[in-house]
């Protein structure tokens, strides 16, 4: 009788234990999980519940959880969801609907692509982007003569890959009201022999962009959804879109709330009077997937189009310094207005003069403040005397490593042997600020974040050039590169307590990799691919 009683009691206790067993939505085992916590620790298993990391540890430790779904990672590496610290998500989607001129090796090839595009699409206004005269045998800006002959009545506007120079045909110039007397402040309108060549640099481009046909809501949605597909396939779970308008931000929010747009967005508002009036007065807007709390400001142009503002003349164009896109007084006035709010200021600064002006403005305004995390976007050419103006709390560098490997073929020609020492100086910036955010600046560069990782670590192009790397002393370690694409990027967005590492309580944003970027040979890093992407514990991408 006693044995029967004990057996019955054991059955009851076992039953109770099963009922009390902790539950999870997902348990992953047999993995190499890089948590990117403070210790950069590795575990083999992870449990997820309600969109957040529930626990991490060994496979055995995860046996306490009864999961709805179990995944055997088969030894694959898992990293936190990748964050693109500076990109143009919406712009990428728009570009997918326009003429793609990336990789063209001559102006003739540019013209051929435009002609083929128009035969297929028959657009009332032809818009394209991606040409780079530095990749051509004749490394000079062309004129619009051929475009005028090919499209006498159809406006054509094609933007340089960096977004800071444009070729517009006469029909486009007429539509924008541009003549030889048009004000070119903050840029350039090229004139030769008393005639417009069609070349516009920086601010005057806005006159043409203002007459672009307005996208329908459905076209905008298609752009956003197309951009999402590409980003998720590369393991990007949060993107920092560097310059958006209210209408687009509200559309993004509505698509996220409806569950259609899964990707998370750190939205920098474009610096316009309307945007500043609305958002600075409204305050921070924060949902689980959208964060609006920063202003994107442009200090100067790009190095490739010689629009970057330099302290001394360009080495390959004497008496030319580039230009600030706004007067210093305007930069300071705008910064002071932002400083009076909770918003962050994120300023595009390429040349050493632009970087100095912005750094000094930030320093003066923030000297009595803490934890403002204002960002210098690009910080591309910095005078060696100015690196100490960056700090750990208020003035942070946000950089794009593939700019270094794209520009390295001609950058020294632009700035000379001395100034190049302060160019693309990621290790120096990291030592000064203790953190650095990495991004792509797509569609200026490719979306692929593994190219970012590779460029940061190897400082080479995909063919292995140059041997030893470009300015190799500025290379980052693999650990710091991953931090720059996860936890540090989250910190730059004021989101380090909710994402950026795989720790209990944080969002279950993670990527299962086909190739372990922390172990494979450096030469293979740019070829790494994604097996699955998860946002809030939901699988949003799976490779075929």
Image (cartoon, rainbow, N blue to C red):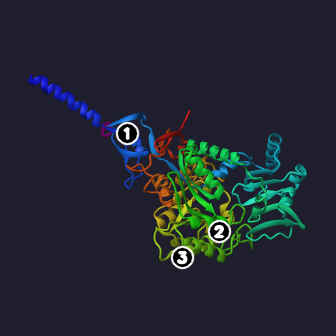
- Chain part drawn in magenta: 60-64
Residue 404's x, y, as percent? 61, 57
Give the mark toward the camera: 3 or 1: 1
Quarter the C terminus occupies: top right
Instruction: Mark yes or no: residue 148 visible.
Output: yes
Give how far apart the Cα atoms at labels 1 and 2 are: 49 Å
Residue where numbered disc 1 is placed: 24
Residue 515's x, y, as percent? 49, 40
Q: Residues within 10 Å of mark 2 (few under 14, many from 20)?
A: many
Residue 496's x, y, as percent? 45, 57
Residue where numbered disc 3 is placed: 365
> Position of 205 compared to 350: left or right?
right
> Position of 218 compared to 499: left or right?
right
Q: Secondary structure at mark 2?
A: loop
Give how far apart the Cα atoms at labels 3 and 2 are: 17 Å
What is the quadrant of residue 71 in the picture? Answer: top left
Residue 465's x, y, as percent? 61, 51
Numbered tag placed on residue 299 in the rendering: 2
């Amino acid at each position: 009788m006693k044995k029967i009683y004990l057996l019955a009691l054991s059955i009851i206790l076992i039953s109770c234990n099963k009922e009390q067993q902790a539950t999870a939505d997902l348990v992953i085992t047999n993995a190499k999980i890089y948590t990117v916590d403070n210790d950069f620790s590795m575990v083999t298993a992870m449990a997820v519940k309600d969109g957040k990391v529930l626990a991490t540890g060994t496979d055995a430790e995860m046996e306490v959880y009864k999961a709805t779904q179990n995944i055997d990672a088969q030894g694959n590496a898992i990293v936190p969801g990748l964050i693109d610290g500076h990109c143009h998500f919406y712009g990428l989607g728009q570009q997918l609907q326009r003429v793609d001129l990336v990789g063209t090796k001559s102006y003739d090839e540019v013209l051929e692509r435009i002609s083929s595009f128009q035969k297929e699409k028959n657009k009332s206004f032809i818009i394209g982007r991606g040409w780079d005269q530095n990749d051509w045998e004749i490394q000079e800006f062309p004129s619009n003569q051929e475009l005028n002959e090919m499209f006498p009545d159809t406006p054509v506007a094609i933007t340089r890959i960096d977004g800071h120079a444009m070729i517009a045909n006469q029909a486009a110039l007429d539509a924008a009201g541009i003549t030889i007397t048009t004000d070119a402040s903050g840029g350039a309108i090229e004139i030769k022999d008393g005639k417009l060549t069609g070349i516009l640099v920086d601010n005057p481009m806005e006159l043409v962009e203002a007459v672009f046909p307005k996208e329908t809501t459905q076209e905008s949605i298609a752009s956003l959804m197309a951009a999402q597909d590409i980003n998720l396939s590369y393991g990007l779970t949060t993107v920092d879109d560097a310059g958006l308008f209210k209408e687009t931000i509200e559309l993004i929010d509505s698509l996220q709330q409806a569950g259609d747009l899964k990707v998370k967005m750190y939205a920098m508002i474009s610096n316009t009077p309307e945007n500043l009036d609305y958002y600075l007065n409204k305050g921070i807007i924060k949902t689980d997937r959208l964060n609006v709390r920063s202003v994107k400001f442009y200090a100067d142009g790009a190095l490739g189009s010689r629009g970057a503002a330099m302290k001394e003349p360009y080495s390959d164009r004497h008496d030319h310094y580039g230009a600030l896109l706004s007067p210093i007084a305007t930069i300071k006035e705008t910064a002071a207005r932002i400083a009076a709010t909770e918003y962050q200021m994120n300023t595009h600064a390429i040349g050493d003069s632009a970087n100095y002006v912005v750094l000094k403005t930030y320093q003066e305004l923030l000297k009595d403040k803490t934890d403002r995390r204002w960002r210098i976007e690009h910080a591309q050419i910095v005078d060696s005397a100015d690196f100490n103006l960056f700090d750990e709390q208020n003035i942070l560098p946000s950089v794009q490593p593939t700019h270094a490997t794209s520009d390295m073929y001609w950058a020294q020609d632009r700035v000379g042997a001395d100034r190049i020492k302060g160019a693309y100086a990621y290790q120096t910036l990291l030592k000064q600020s203790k953190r650095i955010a990495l991004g792509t600046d797509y569609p200026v560069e490719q979306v692929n974040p593994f190219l970012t990782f590779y460029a940061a670590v190897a400082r080479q192009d995909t063919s292995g050039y140059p041997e030893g790397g470009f300015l190799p002393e500025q290379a980052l370690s693999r650990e710091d590169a991953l931090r720059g694409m996860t936890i540090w990027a989250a910190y730059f967005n004021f989101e380090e307590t909710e994402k950026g590492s795989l720790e209990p309580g944080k969002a279950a944003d993670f990527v299962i990799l086909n190739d372990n970027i922390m172990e494979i040979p450096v030469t293979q890093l740019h070829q790494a691919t994604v097996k699955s992407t998860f946002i809030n514990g939901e699988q949003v991408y799976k490779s075929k």
